[in-house]
Amino acid sequence: MKRNGRLILPVLLLVLLGAPALSAQEVLADTGYSPYSLFGFGQLSGAGTTYNATMGGIGLADRNVRFINVLNPAAVTAREAKSFMMDFGVLSNNVIYSADAATSGTPGATGTLRSANNTFNMNHIVFSFPMWKNSAFKAGIMPYSSVGYSLRSYEQSEELLAALGDIQYFRQGQGGLYKAFLGAGVTLWDCLSVGVDGQYYFGNINRYSYALFTSSSVYRSINSGWDDYLSGINAKFGLQYEQKLGRKTALTVGATYQLGTTLSGEERRFAYGVASATDTITDVTTPLAGYKMPAEIGAGLTLRSADGWMIGFDYTRQDWRNSNFAATPGVNFTPCCQQSFRLGGELTPNRYDIRYFFKRLTYHGGLFYERSYLSLNGHQVTDRGLTLGVSIPVSRYYNAINLGFTAGQRGTTEDQLIRETYFTFHISFSLHDIWFLKQLYE
């Protein structure tokens, strides 16, 4: 039998390169769509809310009374007294996939193969309110990872095995994990803030594959795969120290530490004939040994001038090398150490200007570079991009509509990988109110 498609990454990542792209409706349950989500927990979501994402994903040392910062538990105390705050947002992700035809294994293909996909989904909902003097509480839910892919490769039979016909191989997956959290923080001595989040992870990941014998009555086409139902808890600790440098300017240092944990649950393994779902070969559900989620450390630095401007830098590190992820047949996948470098800031020309509306807007921008936890064929997948955004004040207090845009690139067409060029649009609504305010009447 002559194999025209090798079971190495370029063939497995024939995402849409030889087949139509899935529409957004077909992956609506997923928060993303990427061939790299074939591995591990899928594609991780780590940029926080729209507010964080528009500044390159920074937030470990940021203290802003106008927005909820979910990246550091200690930041929950950055607020005005008696303020109730809520933020919810959605995003649209649009991706162009590219691969070198010479290494893709696609018969007759030349040059660069391309396709595209888009998804739309809710991104987060979080709220926060004060508990007592210098302390506050927050809760929310947001995606932690997403799985969404549809891959195809095939073989062509030689004359001796012509009865088999062409053989097509398919791999598909969907699902992901969500993170729900409860947190609280307190500010001590007007300069040191500490906080802790309790985090609960839950979700399911469905992966399956099948081989389709197009002309054979000798061999059955088989559909097989597994469904993982995962859950687990851990905690994240944070601190921020703010040093006044003048009447309006302050330097803040922030740090976080997230405990490692093991996600466990149940795993369903199945196999049956494609022609008939009742033609069951095996269907067994067993307890899942669990995948290790490693500890994460982070540190950040910001310089802020009251309501005028802010600039900051964040660094995070998470070592995934002992995560016990299942092997992926045909692909040299190994988890590795993930590191991210993020730079961002904001500018408000004049928040109190009553003449020029655009001076009251807050403009955000940032850059990021990340070495992901995926190493494929000996090459670590990287992600880099540019972010922009604007916060538009609405009505009184700190109510605002936040718009954001991210342009980035994940992977490369070199080293037998695939390149994702993506454009993400964010929109969120920041709601603000004052609680326990007594009305005075004459």
Image (cartoon, rainbow, N blue to C red):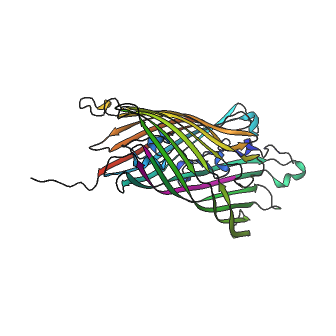
Q: In terms of image quadrants, where is residue 164? A: bottom right
Give the residue displayed 12% in from the left and 54% down from the top: 441
Do we see residue 342 in this rendering?
yes
Locate residue 404, reporting x and y percent: 44, 38
Task: For residue 71, say whether it is visible.
Answer: no
Question: Is 414 located above or below residue 140 in the figure?
Answer: above
In this view, 166 is above or below 411: below
Q: Nearer the viewer, residue 149 or 348?
A: 348
Magenta part of the protein: which range?
171-192
**Where is 390 relative to 3, above or below?**
above
Q: Please tell me whether residue 373 belongs to the stretch shown in magenta.
A: no
x and y percentages locating residue 361 in the rendered image: 34, 34
Residue at coordinates 61% horizontally, 51% vertically from top-left? 148
- Residue 182 location (% of width, % of height): 47, 58
Judging depth in this view, the residue of 32 and 363 nearest the camera is 363
Instruction: Please say whether residue 176 is one of the residues in the magenta stretch.
Output: yes
**Residue positioned most to the right:** 160
| In the displayed structure image, the side of residue 244 where residue 170 appears, left or right | right
Residue 133 percent coordinates (x, y): 34, 53
Magenta segment main secondary structure: strand
